[in-house]
Image (cartoon, rainbow, N blue to C red):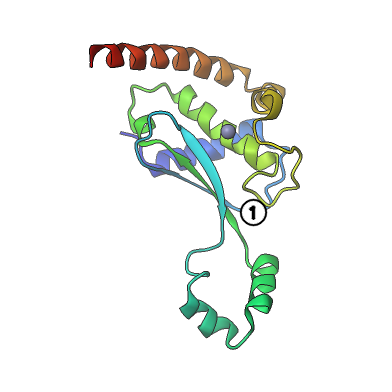
């Protein structure tokens, strides 16, 4: 089974290989999430753990009114992007390129300013196939191809298993 360290290595490899020209405006964390059958990956932007808890606010900002706290929080406290990959992809039977595609897909969102501190480049994250277009531009055509091929088979299997039930 693949683990979070494996994911981390993939992330580093993919950033270096396909996204060397992309601005990393905030740190990226990656981990396996729950076993999702239809949602393979996601990316969200979070503030460091604990910053939202009232105790932390009391300890660190004392009697600052909320308004001040909020502006402090958004300006000075680093945010991080968390990429979550379905646990289904921890199995070695899923081709590495499929997992790599999924990570690259989320990195595209990051690059486009969705769930990252980057400037937002588009109105919607999936508008007009921008993700795969971007991946092709970055030389990840093979990953797009591998994913499409796998997805076709995967959908077929899902449909067959439904037919049996
Ligand atoms: Zn997406």
Bin the neighbour count of mark 1 within 10 Å (Cα to Cα): few under 14, some 14-19, many 20 and up: some
Residue 17: where, in percent of width, then height?
Answer: 62, 31
Residue 138 visible in image: no
Disc 1 beta carbon < 8 A from ligand 1?
no
Residue carrying label 1: 26
Can you tell which quarter of the image residue 92 is in? top left
How many numbered discs?
A: 1
* Image location of residue 93, percent across then percent down: 33, 22
User: Which residue is at the far bottom?
Assistant: 63
On the rendered image, what quadrant is the N terminus found in? top left
Please give left or right for residue 45 compared with residue 151 in the image. Answer: right
Work out which quarter of the rendered image holds the C terminus and state it. Answer: top left
Instruction: Answer above or below: position of 1 versus 62.
Output: above
**Residue 35: x, y in percent?**
34, 36
Say above or below: 153 vs 65: above
Ligand 1 - quadrant of the structure image: top right
Residue placed at 41% from the left, 38% from the top? 6
Q: Could you say where residue 4 lies in the image, as x and y percent from the top left? A: 40, 43
The residue nearer to you, when weighing 16 against 71, is 71
Q: Residue at x 51, y 19 (%)?
A: 147
Question: Which residue does the image show at 64% across and 35% down from the upper left?
Answer: 108
Query: Is 148 drawn above or below residue 29 in the view shown?
Result: above
Q: Secondary structure at mark 1?
A: loop
- Side of 137 relative to 106 (left or right): right
Can residue 18 be seen here?
Answer: yes
Which residue is the extreme one toward the left? 165
């Amino acid at each position: 089974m693949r683990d979070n360290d494996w994911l981390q290595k993939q992330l580093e490899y993919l950033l270096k290989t396909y996204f060397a020209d992309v601005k990393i405006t905030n740190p990226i964390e990656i981990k396996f999430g729950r076993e999702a059958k239809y949602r393979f990956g996601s990316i969200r932007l979070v503030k460091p753990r604990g910053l939202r808890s009232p105790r932390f606010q009391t300890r660190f900002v004392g009697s600052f009114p909320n308004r001040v706290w909020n502006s402090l929080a958004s300006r000075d406290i680093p945010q991080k992007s968390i990429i979550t990959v379905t646990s289904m992809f921890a199995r070695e039977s899923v081709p590495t390129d499929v997992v790599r595609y999924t990570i690259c897909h989320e990195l595209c969102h990051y690059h486009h300013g969705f769930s990252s501190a980057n400037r937002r480049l588009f109105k919607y994250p999936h508008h007009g196939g921008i993700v795969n277009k971007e991946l092709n531009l970055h030389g990840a055509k093979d990953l797009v191809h591998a994913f499409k091929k796998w997805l076709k088979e995967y959908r077929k299997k899902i449909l067959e298993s439904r037919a049996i039930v």
